[in-house]
Amino acid sequence: MATETKKKAAPKAEKAPKASKSAKSVSADAPAKVAAPVVKGLQRRKELVGTVVSNRMQKTIVVQIERRVRHGLYQKYVSKSHKFKAHDEKNDAKMGDIVTIIESRPLSREKRWALQKIVRRAIQTADVNV
């Protein structure tokens, strides 16, 4: 039988002794160490920029997001679009506006985005009845 060599685990580092809870006084010359509160699970919300294609609902806009992806086989760039319903509290956005929407909690079955800001207003044309 072949002899097997076993590797020994590295020795564990010794832990520093804990300070007693009764010693709460801190010397004046020692800087105070304040730990920043750590919040787990919070991440930046996603932001998307798109064009408003509908504002006919109350406090809701439909934003179309265009993106270009490369086709896997033909290596040609193809534009893909997706429509998102977003909450517009003040009914401020109009059709054709370029807006930024931000991820939010679910507000309805399809509405999970909220209007963050209007990047550029659409050019308003006068409606002429001929």
Image (cartoon, rainbow, N blue to C red):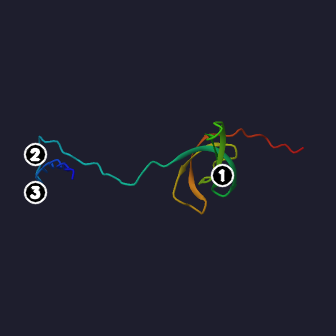
The CA span between labels 2 and 1 is 61 Å
In which quadrant of the rendered view does residue 32 lie? top left
Instruction: Label 3, secondary structure: give it.
Output: loop
Instruction: Label 2, secondary structure: give it.
Output: loop
Q: Which residue is mark 2?
A: 27
**Image coordinates for residue 39, horizontal then vertical, percent:** 35, 53
Neighbor class of circle 2 (other Cα within 10 Å; few <14, some 14-19, many 20+) is: few
Residue visible at 56% across and 45% down in the picture: 48
Q: Which mark is residue 20?
A: 3
The quadrant the C terminus occupies is top right
Residue visible at 66% across and 38% down in the picture: 74
Image height check: is 66 above or below 105? above
Neighbor class of circle 3 (other Cα within 10 Å; few <14, some 14-19, many 20+) is: few
Instruction: Report if the CB atoms under discs 2 and 1 are less than 8 Å apart.
Output: no
Please name whichever residue, 105 or 95, is drawn nearer the observer in this view of the structure: 105
The CA span between labels 3 and 2 is 15 Å
Amino acid type at mark 2: Ser
Is 84 on the left-hand or right-hand side of 40?
right
Amino acid type at mark 3: Ser
Is 24 on the left-hand or right-hand side of 77?
left
Q: Which residue is mark 1?
A: 62
Instruction: Report if the CB atoms under discs 3 and 2 are less than 8 Å apart.
Output: no
